[in-house]
Amino acid sequence: MAQILLPLSLLSLLFSVALADLTRIEHSLKNDGSLSILVIGDWGRKGTYNQSLVAEQMGKVGKELDIDFVISTGDNFYENGLTGVDDKAFEQSFSDIYTADSLQKPWYTVLGNHDYRGDVIAQLSPVLQKLDSRFICMRSFIVNSEIVEFFLVDTTPFVMKYWTTPEGQHYDWRDVEPRNTYISNLLQDLNNALQASSANWKIVVGHHTMRSVSEHRDTAELLKYMLPILKKNSVDFYVNGHDHCLEHISSTDSPLQYFTSGGGSKA
């Protein structure tokens, strides 16, 4: 679990048209112009592997900070995503776990590699929002809070080994194939959105690590294809999950800060 605090002015919560091809969400802020959020990843284990304990602490911190929303960095349902919109794992790993009053806020969610092992279309389905209105999951989208914008990006298709050597796992590439076209379009949309942003803070969120000294280390495909866009557009933070820990890494070659928040359950 990680937290970010930024001063902001008041906006109303609404959905609007996409900027380029990325859906854009406008989020309301507190009357005092502040924003408080929690970031968590790699959590969906039906309460096991400390998920329930982390959720309990999130509830306490969420109340103390009076959070506005939660960002999930992916791997929302282990081990193999959801089997469909009627999969009870949705309630068992989400609705029944994050029950604290302070966590009854929007959860802006990206997909992780374990989510891609299941029915991705189901996890993206609005049917899940009817079951629990907090759960807002898309492949890539923007959450705008005036002076800060969060650019949530679908990183799993970038990683070549999931395509070439899936090690017996099935990945749901519907609406993603062909890979090169999907990635090219996504990078262009991200670049366009970052260029158009007038926010003082630009924060990009993805599942996979860009810089990490933990188990998964750096993700070469993101360093090659996405990092130059982030640097060119003066992105402040890149926030990810994937490694089941918390990290903050700085670099000498740019002001960009790298945060890992993948401690939602199994360490």
Image: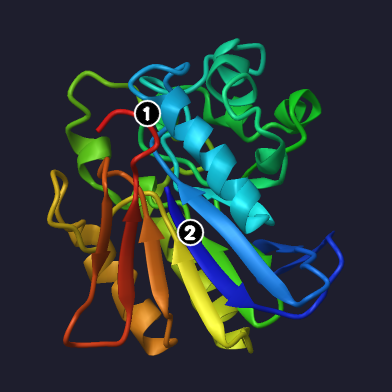
Quadrant in the rendering for residue 14: bottom right
Q: Does the image show residue 37? A: yes
Q: Is residue 91 left or right of residue 58?
A: right
Q: Does the image show residue 109? A: no
Tell me which residue sits at (34%, 84%) in the image: 231
Quadrant in the rendering for residue 136: top right
Residue under label 1: 171
Instruction: State the SS at label 1.
Output: loop
Mark 2 or 1: in front is 2
Residue type for callout 1: Tyr
Tell me which residue sits at (64%, 47%) in the image: 63
Residue type for callout 2: Gln
Between marks 2 and 1, how big is the CA–CA gap?
31 Å
Percent x, y for residue 250? 23, 76
Q: Residues within 10 Å of mark 1 (few under 14, many from 20)?
A: many
Q: Nearer the viewer, residue 168 or 146?
A: 146
Q: Quadrant of the C terminus?
A: top left
Percent x, y for residue 185? 50, 64
Quadrant in the rendering for residue 232: bottom left
Number of numbered labels in the structure image: 2
Percent x, y for residue 216? 16, 46
Q: Residues within 10 Å of mark 2 (few under 14, many from 20)?
A: some
Residue under label 2: 3
Tell me which residue sits at (19%, 87%) in the image: 253
Q: Is residue 249 left or right of residue 264?
A: left
Tell me which residue sits at (69%, 31%) in the image: 125
Percent x, y for residue 189? 55, 70
Q: Nearer the viewer, residue 236 or 193?
A: 236
